[in-house]
Image: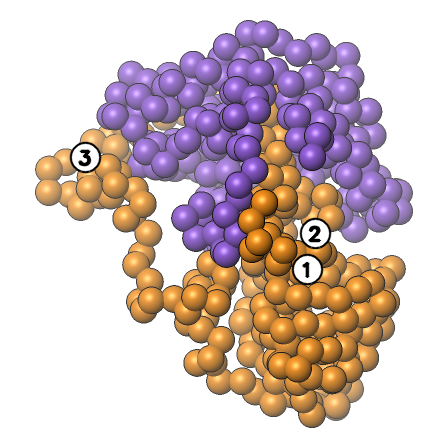
């Protein structure tokens, strides 16, 4: 049911990766395709499908989902992308980020019959966020590039807990047990990893 | 900076907890507690956006898994059916914000958005007396992943004995205040207590303190809930 640790870590040792300029261009193309999908462009949808459906399926397989359900969930995710494309705001998130959240929520819905309680942008309480938004500081392409750089800069130990957090569906105590380290170590590795991500995305200057 | 920002929360979820929430590995009750905090806290929403960006980057990096041969055409067929004239789903796609089920009644202004899916308002609930000065509403008695969530309404000055325990327990304040060794908690503040923490909260304002308490396991009579419930279930 749970993927072997070794397979989870195939991509964890990312310290030798360098930021890929092609990836950033890809991110901009994907955003443009999503906007086209909102206007009903099926060719753009087919391109997004070709890129994301196999990755969403891989994501579900990594989480231990059987092949057929992973396939179904990949298709459901893309259908949701079609339906919700008008909600996508390229200034706020990469296309990959947006697709990730859709797949994550559908999986929770399908697997656990649970909801993932969330805050929608139009129901924020009391305080308007009047800080500059991320897009004022950093455009999407630079954000994608910097994020990849930050991922590549994680230590193998940090990358490992990040991978396990996203792909093993384990609570932190279970991750600690699996790695045979104290719970506090898991939490501090995640904190250090997030500090690198935050710094890279330029949110460290407040 | 606006004056209203004076009321931003002071007690936040850890980065690790936000990663678990963003990765989708928290149960529904714990996620609800985090979401209530997020409704109050722009800083933690910014961190969550970073966590989700991280999820997107990890998704990008996955080696693609082969799809079934007719995967795209099967999806396009479903899409065709949705787009067929007369199908209400077509309107749903073009105006997606209307696709959510409408709230049955106007929500109480004081209730954080994520909670509205669970309770109509704090006033209309049937509170069950649990102990002197303490009333409770079970919100999620037992979620599919094993957690639980309840609302507690605690009278001013009531102390809640607490001891350390193995699981994760999240408390987020909806109204009023409580205090413990770590500080004073008001609306939106989230207390994250796991195995190695010990605290004794006291409702410390002049009005009831209403909070949401979520745990990662049901019926484990430990922690705040356990101490409250023990006299009533004969443990």
In this rendering, the answer to whether A132 lies above or below A42 is: below
Q: Chain of mark 3?
A: B
Seen from the viewer's position, the closer of residues A155 and A61 is A155
Q: Colour of chain A?
A: purple
Report the residue at 19% width, 35% height from top. B83
Quarter that holds the C terminus of chain B: bottom right
Label 2 vs label 1: CA separation? 6 Å
Report the residue at 31% width, 21% height from top. A36
Both marks 2 and 3 on one chain: yes
Question: For the residue labelled by badge 2, is the local secondary structure a helix, a strand or a loop?
Answer: loop
Q: Are marks 2 and 3 in contact (CB under 8 Å)?
A: no
Seen from the viewer's position, the closer of residues B84 and B197 is B197
Whichever of labels 2 and 3 marks the residue nearer the N terminus, that label is: 2
Seen from the viewer's position, the closer of residues A157 and A190 is A190
Both marks 3 and 1 on one chain: yes
Circle 2 sits on which residue?
Answer: B13
Label 2 vs label 3: CA separation? 42 Å
Q: Pinpoint residue A152: horizontal percent, then vertical percent.
A: 73, 18
Report the residue at 50% width, 48% height from top. A128
Circle 1 sits on which residue?
Answer: B190
Q: Pinpoint residue B20: horizontal percent, then vertical percent.
A: 66, 45
Whichever of labels 3 and 1 marks the residue nearer the N terminus, that label is: 3
Quarter that holds the N terminus of chain B: top right
Report the residue at 26% width, 34% height from top. B78
In this rendering, the answer to whether B221 lies above or below A148 is: below
Question: For the residue labelled by badge 1, is the local secondary structure a helix, a strand or a loop?
Answer: strand
Q: Pinpoint residue A92: horizontal percent, then vertical percent.
A: 49, 31
Label 3 vs label 1: CA separation? 44 Å
Q: Are marks 2 and 1 in contact (CB under 8 Å)?
A: yes
Local crowd size for mark 3, using a 10 Å CA cut-off: few (<14), some (14–19), many (≥20): some
Q: Colour of chain B?
A: orange
């Amino acid at each position: 049911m749970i993927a072997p640790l070794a397979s989870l870590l195939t991509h964890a040792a990312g310290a030798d990766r360098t930021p890929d300029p092609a990836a950033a261009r890809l991110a901009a193309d994907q955003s443009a395709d999503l906007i086209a999908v909102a206007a009903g462009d099926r060719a753009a949808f087919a391109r997004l499908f070709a890129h994301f459906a196999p990755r969403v399926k891989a994501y579900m397989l990594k989480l231990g989902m059987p092949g057929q359900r992973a396939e179904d969930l990949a298709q459901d995710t893309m259908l949701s992308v079609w339906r919700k494309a008008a909600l996508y705001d390229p200034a706020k998130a990469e296309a990959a980020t947006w697709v990730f959240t859709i797949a994550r929520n559908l999986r929770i819905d399908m697997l656990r019959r649970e909801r993932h309680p969330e805050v929608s942008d139009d129901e924020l309480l009391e305080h308007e966020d009047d800080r500059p938004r991320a897009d004022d500081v950093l455009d999407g392409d630079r954000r994608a590039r910097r994020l990849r750089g930050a991922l590549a800069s994680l230590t193998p130990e940090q990358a490992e807990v990040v991978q396990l957090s996203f792909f093993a569906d384990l609570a932190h105590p279970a991750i600690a047990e699996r790695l045979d380290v104290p719970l506090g170590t898991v939490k501090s590795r995640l904190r250090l990893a997030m500090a690198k991500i935050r710094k890279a995305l330029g949110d460290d200057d407040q | 900076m606006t004056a209203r920002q004076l009321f931003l929360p002071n007690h936040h979820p850890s980065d690790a907890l936000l990663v678990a929430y963003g990765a989708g590995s928290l149960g529904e009750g714990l996620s609800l507690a985090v979401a209530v905090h997020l409704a109050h806290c722009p800083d933690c929403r910014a961190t969550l956006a970073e966590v989700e960006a991280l999820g997107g980057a990890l998704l990008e990096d996955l080696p693609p898994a082969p799809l079934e041969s007719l995967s795209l055409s099967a999806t396009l067929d479903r899409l065709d059916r949705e787009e067929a004239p007369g199908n209400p789903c077509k309107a749903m796609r073009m105006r997606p914000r209307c696709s959510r089920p409408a709230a049955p009644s106007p929500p109480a202004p004081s209730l954080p958005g994520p909670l509205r899916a669970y309770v109509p308002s704090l006033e209309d609930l049937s509170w069950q007396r649990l102990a002197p000065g303490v009333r409770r509403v079970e919100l999620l008695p037992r979620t599919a992943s094993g957690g639980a969530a309840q609302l507690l309404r605690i009278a001013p000055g009531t102390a809640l004995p607490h001891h350390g325990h193995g699981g994760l327990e999240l408390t987020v304040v909806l109204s009023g205040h409580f205090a413990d060794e770590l500080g004073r908690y008001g609306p939106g503040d989230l207390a994250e207590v796991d195995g190695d923490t010990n605290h004794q909260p006291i409702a410390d304002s002049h009005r009831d303190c209403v909070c949401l308490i979520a745990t990662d396991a049901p019926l484990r009579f430990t922690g705040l809930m356990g101490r409250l419930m023990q006299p009533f279930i004969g443990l």
